[in-house]
Image (tube, rainbow, N blue to C red):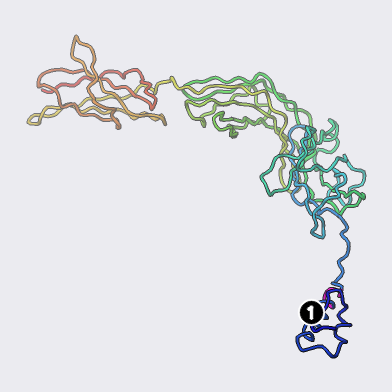
């Protein structure tokens, strides 16, 4: 054999067995032996994946009327941190006896949604930003008699995601909602705009005969159509005669929608729980301010004394409107019309008129102006003269 590089197909043991090789070839033998040993040594064996989806940990439940809406993130990994690819159905579990120990007979069983799904069913993924798991929803329609039979109890929900072999790593976190009954929405909702605010009226609903521990109240929602935000405009107890609510928490020059729902209050060991019923159809109203402030009251005129430069001081009671911008001051002489004498709005309920002549009589009145330029009628006149 020549002293050149041995063929790669020679086993390393055979190479090392050659004793008459040069120093350079012996080094190649050692390297080949090491590579052969490395390639042939088995690593630590890993157990096969069980393909069990990680249990859901962010299940949420909200109830409105007779519908309970569940939302959760679809698992994307298995319990051993592999990608979850062998998805089976998702079981929806419900019980009147919290906590749930096992799913038992599921309320429903649906296909586990996938990010690319475009299903239009009520159980579907929703669009989420990149890098976040897809979201799934399910709506449980409660039977009418369920809450009547167990008004003070809670419904508990969980979901269980199975793999394609029908196996699961367990239930999700559990969420509860009251099982108490809700009332149908009232009728006749109307909104009326005035300078005081937006007055809402609707048909009364008599308080029903219900088990002890249940109460009801009206809740009025206001939606700002400019930003779509909802807020509570006010609440009233049920059975208070003809219900009416004056809303003063809005902003002028915006458009709003109002709706009313009847809320069930449930006395439980952990406190009072609430369940909102269905809403009335919304009523829309534009809060356009065409209402002037109140007419100022208490106007008085005080003239300067002898030896002073002539003037007439005016004072009056301040208006209390939150949107008040200021006042205008008017003056007239006998037989003439009133003329505004302030160059700009007067910000305080006081004004000095220095443009007067000794021995002449003047008649003064004031008006209030809001931030949208609505001006009140003028006040009663006050007479002033400099002797």
- Please give left or right for residue 14 compared with residue 152 in the image: right
Along the viewing direction, whichever of 23 and 162 lies nearer the viewer: 23
The reply to whether residue 175 is visible in this rendering is: yes
Q: Position of residue 46 (x, y in %)?
A: 86, 66
Q: Position of residue 252 (x, y in %)?
A: 47, 27
Q: Secondary structure at mark 1?
A: loop
Q: Position of residue 25 (x, y in %)?
A: 79, 84
Decide: is 188 above or below 269: above
The reply to whether residue 70 is visible in this rendering is: no
Q: Was residue 153 drawn as part of the magenta stretch in this picture? A: no
**Numbered disc total:** 1
Image quarter in which the C terminus is found = top left
User: What is the quadrant of residue 318 in the picture?
Assistant: top left
User: What is the quadrant of residue 81 in the picture?
Assistant: bottom right
Q: Residue furthest left?
A: 307
Name the residue: 77% across, 47% down: 74
Image quarter in which the N terminus is found = bottom right
Decide: is 291 above or below 155: above
**Residue located beneath label 1 in the image:** 5
Along the viewing direction, whichever of 77 and 154 lies nearer the viewer: 77
Q: Main secondary structure of the magenta part?
A: helix
Decide: is 128 above or below 369: below
Provide the residue span drawn in magenta: 37-41
Name the residue: 82% across, 58% down: 79
């Amino acid at each position: 054999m020549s002293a050149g590089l041995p063929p790669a197909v020679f086993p390393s043991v055979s190479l090392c067995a050659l004793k008459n090789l040069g120093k350079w070839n012996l080094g190649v033998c050692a390297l080949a032996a090491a590579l052969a040993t490395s390639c042939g040594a088995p690593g630590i064996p890993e157990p096969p994946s069980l393909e069990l989806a990680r249990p859901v940990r962010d299940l949420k439940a909200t109830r409105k009327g007779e519908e309970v809406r569940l939302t959760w993130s679809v698992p994307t990994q298995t319990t051993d941190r592999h990608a979850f690819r062998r998805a089976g159905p998702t079981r929806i579990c419900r019980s009147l006896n919290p906590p749930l120990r096992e799913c038992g007979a599921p309320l429903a069983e649906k296909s586990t949604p996938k990010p690319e799904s475009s299903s239009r069913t009520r159980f579907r993924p929703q669009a989420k930003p990149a890098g976040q798991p897809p979201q799934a929803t399910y709506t449980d329609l409660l039977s009418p008699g369920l809450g009547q039979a167990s008004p003070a109890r809670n419904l508990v929900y969980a979901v269980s995601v199975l793999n394609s072999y029908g196996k699961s790593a367990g239930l999700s976190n559990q969420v509860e909602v009251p099982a108490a009954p809700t009332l149908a929405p009232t009728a006749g909702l109307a909104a009326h705009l005035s300078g005081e605010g937006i007055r809402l009226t609707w048909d009364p609903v008599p308080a029903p005969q219900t088990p002890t521990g249940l109460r009801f109240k009206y809740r009025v929602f206001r939606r700002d159509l400019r930003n779509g935000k909802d807020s509570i405009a006010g609440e009233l107890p049920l059975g208070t005669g003809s219900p009416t609510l004056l809303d003063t928490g809005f902003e002028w020059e915006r458009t709003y929608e109002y709706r009313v729902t009847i809320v069930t209050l449930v006395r439980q060991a952990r406190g009072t729980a609430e369940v909102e019923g269905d809403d009335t159809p919304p009523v829309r109203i534009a809060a356009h301010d065409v209402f002037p402030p109140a007419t100022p009251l208490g106007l008085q005129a005080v003239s300067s004394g002898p030896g002073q430069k002539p003037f007439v001081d005016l004072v009056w009671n301040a208006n209390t409107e939150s949107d008040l911008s200021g006042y205008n001051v008017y003056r007239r002489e006998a037989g003439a019309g009133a003329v505004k004498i302030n160059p700009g709005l007067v910000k305080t309920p006081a004004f000095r008129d220095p443009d007067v002549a000794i021995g002449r009589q003047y008649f003064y009145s004031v008006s209030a102006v809001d931030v949208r330029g609505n001006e009140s009628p003028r006040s009663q006149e006050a007479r002033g003269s400099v002797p």
